[in-house]
Image (spheres, rainbow, N blue to C red):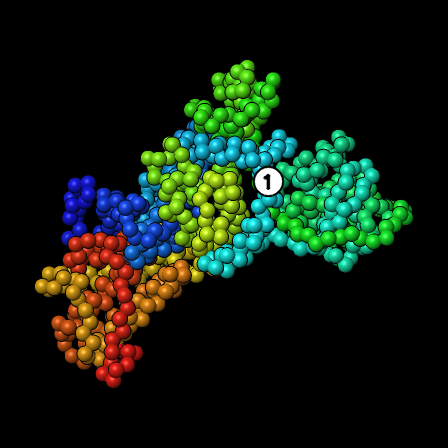
């Protein structure tokens, strides 16, 4: 067989049964590369498009075990869709900016750009050894100037529309104008797996209640919230989030401001048993709340963010354990001596969300430079869009903590003001990877040759969006929320075409993680945590099939030798059983493999045909809903059924030509069902039967139940 590039490919010649799984798999990987088997089809392809998106990988030395599970699931589904006749886009993005890359580059004494290059090669090699059918030409790396130049353009577009604001020297994206629409959009996610929807609700954190206007002494006017509309009179203090938009009104005292600033720098995790450890600042201000006797002290604490988001709330110790902890720490008397009173509450229905405004800048060197300059005459001035990207210094090195990595790059931060032409200084902060990685899924749609011109609102968006299926770890629920949020914003500002129900992802699966057991070394398999060694020993098919077969996506599991040995035994048994039978057919039969069928006129062959039909129906349905564990189980069960058929025949009579043809037809069905789960061995067995093309191009089988002698289709003898 000759590839499109003119390379002679050894297909259909079989293989040495003694060769290692790694060498067999490397041979088929070379075939796929030469054939460009997984390139995203061009717009002339009339098949229904389907875009499969898996979570972006971090630029680290080794992909985590959980990320391998993500790509095993996503790849199996992408292969299944191709076989079903869809035009599939499946690639990956690498989040290459951020602290992990800085730390690794510093430790190794290399530039972060060099480190990222190494990581990208490593990621591709690793995923290829596992048989991932990515379109590598569409692979996207966030430190590519074409990519981060568009990130900078998005930053300016958001700034122009007053969606960004600056606080404590950092830039934030306002979400209050869009979060309500994001939360309402959850009702449109009919194709999402239930856990994924629940995680979105938890991330958004909607709380229904009431809000009330209060007057303060020592601060400005304030609106406070409580979910306890019938208990306002029991309030004993007011608590304000340190991220509240107007918190500066209560931090005029330098001592208070000094204590509040660090509260914004830490992601506080709320636990009931350590609520007393969450910081709190008691201000000098007091509040008069309608319906509450006395004046209430005002405190500032991140416990508000954890419960209600960046707002102000009434503290009601009688109804909330965290409020009780705060009340214990208030100085006495806690305002009780002020016996002012109000006749009643003017509370009105309100909603709060725990989700915060997103941080979109950071004082770190490795990232997309914030596209702003500071001019003594003009103030903060945006860099003109035509001057983007603002490039990082080519030779940027990460300096030890406390040293300026840009000290040797004065030409970077010294610049000319684009407004007045005077001297200016470039903003040396960088765009936070939180924003930088939020739109990767859209950029993958853009063909590489068009990325230098523009990655936003490309014509290919209309073809590939919304994403058919997103696969993610449950730990990435916040990332998925932020992608949905930004998709809504980009549609509002005209940078993304309108999507059905404004939602970017038609279906979403969020799988549980993989645990590494303490004892990861077995005498049989070696170190099961060392994927390189493991793939060299047992093959990429064994590793990915074990990932898929070990547990359903909704369950976590321990990565140990048990699922590996189970899948290794199955694949070895399949190869040893199928190879001689497929070779014999290819050598002796004058029929092509596609012509092989099961003659159901005899009861044992009719039973085999029934088993094949049931397996085809079940595996198809299970792959459609990404139940990979069940699909793998039913493929394994089909091999047992085929072997059982042959054993039963031999118990009663000699094997006939129709029996051998039935075994071949059943094996070829099994190979096609197995192809999304263990693609290398599927290609090998497909070729041994004399097939000229690739099994990944063979299409998906259809089920046909045989009719029994009494007219039923249950396959019973």
Q: Position of residue 509 (x, y in %)?
A: 45, 55
Is residue 557 shown to the viewer in this render? no
In this view, which residue lies farthest toward the bottom?
710
622 vs 658, left or right, is right
- Residue at 54% across / 36% down in the picture? 158
Q: Nearer the viewer, residue 583 or 694?
A: 694
Q: Quadrant of the C terminus?
A: bottom left
> Above or below — where is 522 with respect to 715?
above
The local crowd at label 1, few if under 14, some if 14 to 19, many if 20 or more residues have their Cα within 10 Å, is: some
Q: Position of residue 160 (x, y in %)?
A: 55, 32
Residue identified by numbered label 1: 174
Quarter holding residue 241: top right
208 vs 503, left or right, is right
Q: Position of residue 537 (x, y in %)?
A: 31, 50
Q: Secondary structure at mark 1?
A: loop
Q: Position of residue 187 (x, y in %)?
A: 53, 58
360 vs 254, left or right, is left
> Above or below — where is 566 with respect to 46?
below
- What is the count of numbered marks? 1
> Above or below — where is 73 with respect to 701?
above
- Residue at 67% across / 55% down in the picture? 208
Is residue 264 shown to the viewer in this render? yes
Q: Nearer the viewer, residue 325 or 358?
A: 358
- Residue at 16% across / 45% down in the picture? 2
- Residue at 44% across / 55% down in the picture? 507
């Amino acid at each position: 067989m000759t590839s499109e590039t003119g390379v002679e490919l050894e297909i259909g010649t079989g293989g040495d049964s003694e060769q290692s799984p790694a060498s067999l798999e490397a041979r088929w990987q070379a075939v796929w590369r030469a054939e460009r088997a997984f390139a995203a089809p061009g717009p002339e392809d009339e098949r229904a498009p389907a875009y499969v998106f898996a979570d972006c990988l971090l630029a680290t030395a080794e992909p985590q075990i959980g990320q391998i599970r993500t790509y095993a699931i996503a790849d199996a589904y992408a292969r299944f869709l191709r076989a079903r006749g869809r035009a599939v886009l499946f690639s990956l993005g690498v989040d290459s900016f951020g602290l992990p890359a800085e730390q690794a580059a510093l430790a190794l004494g290399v530039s972060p750009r060099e480190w990222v290059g190494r990581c990208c090669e490593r990621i591709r090699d690793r995923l290829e050894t596992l048989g991932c059918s990515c379109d590598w030409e569409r692979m996207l790396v966030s430190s590519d100037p074409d990519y981060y130049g568009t990130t900078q353009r998005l930053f300016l577009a958001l700034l122009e529309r007053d969606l960004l604001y600056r606080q404590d020297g950092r830039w934030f994206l306002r979400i209050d104008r869009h979060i309500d629409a994001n939360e309402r959009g959850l009702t449109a996610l009919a194709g999402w797996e239930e856990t994924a929807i629940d995680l979105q609700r938890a991330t958004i954190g909607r709380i229904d209640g009431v809000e009330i206007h209060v007057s303060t002494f020592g601060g400005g006017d304030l609106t406070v919230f409580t979910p306890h509309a019938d208990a306002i009179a029991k309030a004993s203090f007011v608590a304000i989030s340190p991220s509240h938009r107007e918190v500066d009104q209560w931090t005029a005292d330098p001592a208070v401001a000094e204590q509040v600033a660090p509260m914004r720098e830490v992601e506080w995790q709320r636990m009931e048993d350590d609520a007393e450890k969450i910081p709190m600042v008691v201000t000098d201000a007091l509040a008069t709340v309608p319906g509450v006797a006395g004046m209430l002290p005002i405190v500032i604490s991140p416990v508000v963010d954890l419960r209600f988001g960046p707002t102000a709330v009434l503290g009601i110790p009688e109804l909330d354990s965290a409020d009780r902890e705060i009340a214990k720490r208030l100085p006495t008397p806690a305002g009780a001596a002020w016996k002012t009173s109000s006749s009643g509450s003017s509370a009105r229905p309100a909603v709060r969300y725990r989700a915060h405004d997103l941080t979109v800048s950071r004082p770190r060197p490795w990232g997309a430079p914030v596209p702003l300059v500071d001019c003594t005459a003009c103030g903060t001035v945006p860099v003109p869009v035509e001057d983007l990207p603002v490039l990082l210094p080519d030779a940027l090195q990460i300096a030890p903590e406390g040293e300026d990595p840009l000290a040797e790059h004065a030409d970077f931060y010294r610049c000319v003001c684009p407004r007045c032409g005077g001297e200016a200084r470039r903003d040396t902060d960088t765009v936070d990877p939180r924003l930088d990685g939020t739109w990767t899924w859209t950029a993958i749609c853009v063909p590489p040759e068009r990325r230098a011109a523009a990655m936003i609102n490309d014509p290919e968006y209309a073809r590939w969006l919304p994403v058919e299926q997103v696969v993610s770890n449950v730990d990435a629920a916040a990332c998925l929320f932020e992608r949905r949020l930004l998709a809504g914003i980009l549609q509002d500002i005209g940078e993304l075409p309108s999507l059905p129900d404004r939602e970017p992802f038609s279906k979403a699966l969020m799988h549980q993680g993989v645990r590494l057991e303490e004892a990861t070394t077995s005498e049989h398999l070696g170190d099961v945590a060392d994927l390189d060694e493991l793939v060299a020993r047992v093959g990429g098919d064994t590793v990915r099939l074990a990932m898929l077969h070990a547990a359903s996506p909704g369950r976590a599991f321990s990565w140990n030798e048990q699922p590996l040995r189970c899948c290794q035994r199955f694949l070895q048994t399949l190869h040893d059983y199928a190879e001689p039978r497929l070779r014999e057919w290819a050598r002796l039969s004058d029929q092509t493999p596609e012509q092989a069928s099961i003659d159901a006129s005899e009861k044992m062959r009719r039973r085999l045909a029934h088993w094949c039909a049931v397996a085809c129906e079940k595996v198809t349905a299970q792959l459609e809903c990404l139940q990979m564990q069940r699909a793998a189980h039913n493929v394994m069960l089909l091999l047992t059924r085929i072997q059982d058929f042959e054993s039963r025949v031999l118990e009663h009579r000699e094997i006939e030509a129709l029996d051998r043809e039935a075994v071949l037809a059943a094996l070829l069905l099994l190979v096609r069902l197995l192809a999304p789960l263990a693609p290398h061995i599927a290609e090998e067995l497909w070729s041994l039967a004399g097939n000229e093309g690739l099994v990944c191009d063979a299409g998906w089988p259809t089920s046909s139940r045989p009719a029994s002698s009494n007219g039923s289709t249950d396959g019973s003898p």
